[in-house]
Image: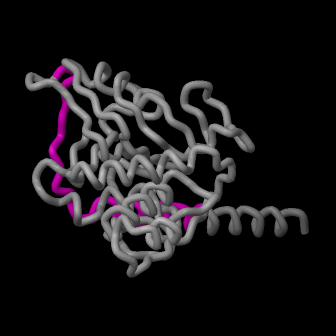
C-alpha cells in the first residue's frame, strides 16, 4: 500500500516537472522567434563620439517576457523600468552623461538603497538617470527618442512635474486614449491621475503631448517592453541599446 502511494507521488511529480519544462521550452522558443528590433547598439563605455541624452528621451529596461499581455524583448528580465529625461546631458562616457541627466520616474523599488518604498513621497520622483540605469544594467538599457519640439518638451516637463506629489503606485494601470488635441487643457485633464507605475506614467505623458499610442501591442495594460517595441522608435537613431 505504501509503495503504491509512493509511486503515485513520483508520477505526479514527473507530470508536473514535464509540464514546467514544456512551458519553459515554449517560452524560450517565443523569445527566440521574436522579431528583431531595429536598434543601434553601443558597446563601449566611452563611445568615440561621446554620449548624450535629450530632454524628452525615455530610458527603459525590458521586463520579463512572460508577464500577461507583454510584448517580447530578448533582454527582458525582472520587472523592467521606464524613466523620462527632463534635463538632457552630454558626457565623454555613458556614466558621465547618466550622472548629469535628470529624469522623472515612477518607482516602487529604489535601486540606490535596494529597498521597496511603499507609501513614500518618492513614488514619483525627480532624480539622476544613473540611479535606475547604472552600470549594473549594461547591455539591457534602452534610449527611446521621439525628437519632441521645444513646445512639446515644455508640456511634457509640466505634466511630469505636476505628478511629483502623487504617492500611489499601482502594479496594473489601464490606458485611456482620448481624441482631444495633444497638449490641450482637455488632454491634460484626461491624462492627469494619482495612481501610476513607471510605464503608465510614460505612456500617459506622451499621449498627452503627442496624441500617439506608444504601446507596441495596443493592449489595455502597458509594460516597458510594449514601449520599447513601439514602431514609433523604429526609425534610425530612435532606439539605442547600451
Q: Nearer the viewer, residue 228 or 87?
A: 87
* Left or right relative to 101: residue 161: right
As displayed, is residue 65 above or below residue 144? below
Snapshot quadrant of residue 7: bottom right
Position of residue 64 measured from the top left corner of the image (x, y, whole percent): 47, 54
Q: Quadrant of the N terminus?
A: bottom right
Residue 33 inside the magenta-drawn segment? yes
Question: How is the structure coloured here?
Answer: one colour
Q: Residue at x 61, y 29 (%)?
A: 114
Q: Residue at x 43, y 55 (%)?
A: 202
As displayed, is residue 105 above or below residue 113? below
Q: Nearer the viewer, residue 229 or 67?
A: 229
* Left or right relative to 102: residue 234: left
Q: Residue at x 31, y 65 (%)?
A: 210
User: Is any part of residue 65 visible from this angle?
Assistant: no
* Left or right relative to 35: residue 130: right
Q: Residue furthest front?
A: 185
Q: Residue at x 82, y 69 (%)?
A: 4
Report the magenta residues as a range.
Answer: 17-46
Position of residue 159 measured from the top left corner of the image (x, y, whole percent): 46, 53
> How many numbered circles are shown?
0
Position of residue 145 measured from the top left corner of the image (x, y, whole percent): 24, 50
User: Is any part of residue 218 visible from this angle?
Assistant: yes
As displayed, is residue 110 above or below residue 30? above
Q: Quadrant of the C terminus?
A: top left
Q: Residue furthest bottom?
A: 179
Snapshot quadrant of residue 142: top left
Q: Nearer the viewer, residue 107 or 103?
A: 103
Position of residue 120 measured from the top left corner of the image (x, y, whole percent): 71, 39
Residue 132 inside the magenta-drawn segment? no
Amino acid at each position: 500500500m505504501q509503495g503504491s502511494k509512493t509511486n503515485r507521488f513520483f508520477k505526479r511529480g514527473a507530470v508536473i516537472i514535464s509540464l514546467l519544462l514544456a512551458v519553459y521550452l515554449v517560452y524560450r522558443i517565443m523569445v527566440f522567434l521574436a522579431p528583431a528590433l531595429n536598434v543601434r547598439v553601443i558597446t563601449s563605455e566611452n563611445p568615440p563620439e561621446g554620449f548624450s541624452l535629450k530632454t524628452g528621451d525615455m530610458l527603459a529596461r525590458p521586463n520579463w517576457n512572460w508577464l500577461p499581455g507583454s510584448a517580447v524583448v530578448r533582454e527582458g528580465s525582472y520587472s523592467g523600468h521606464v524613466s523620462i529625461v527632463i534635463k538632457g546631458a552630454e558626457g565623454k562616457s555613458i556614466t558621465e552623461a547618466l550622472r548629469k541627466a535628470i529624469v522623472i520616474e515612477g518607482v516602487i523599488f529604489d535601486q540606490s538603497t535596494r529597498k521597496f518604498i511603499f507609501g513614500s513621497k518618492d513614488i514619483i520622483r525627480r532624480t539622476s538617470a544613473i540611479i535606475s540605469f547604472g552600470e549594473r544594467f549594461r547591455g539591457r538599457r534602452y534610449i527611446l527618442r521621439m525628437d519632441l519640439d521645444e513646445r512639446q518638451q515644455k508640456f511634457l516637463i509640466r505634466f511630469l512635474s505636476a505628478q511629483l506629489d502623487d504617492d500611489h503606485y499601482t502594479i496594473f494601470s489601464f490606458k485611456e486614449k482620448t481624441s482631444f488635441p495633444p497638449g490641450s487643457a482637455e488632454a491634460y485633464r484626461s491624462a492627469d491621475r494619482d495612481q501610476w507605475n513607471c510605464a503608465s506614467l510614460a505612456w500617459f505623458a506622451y499621449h498627452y503631448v503627442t496624441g500617439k499610442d506608444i504601446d507596441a501591442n495596443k493592449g489595455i495594460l502597458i509594460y516597458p517592453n510594449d514601449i520599447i517595441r513601439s514602431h514609433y522608435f523604429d526609425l534610425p537613431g530612435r532606439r539605442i541599446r547600451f
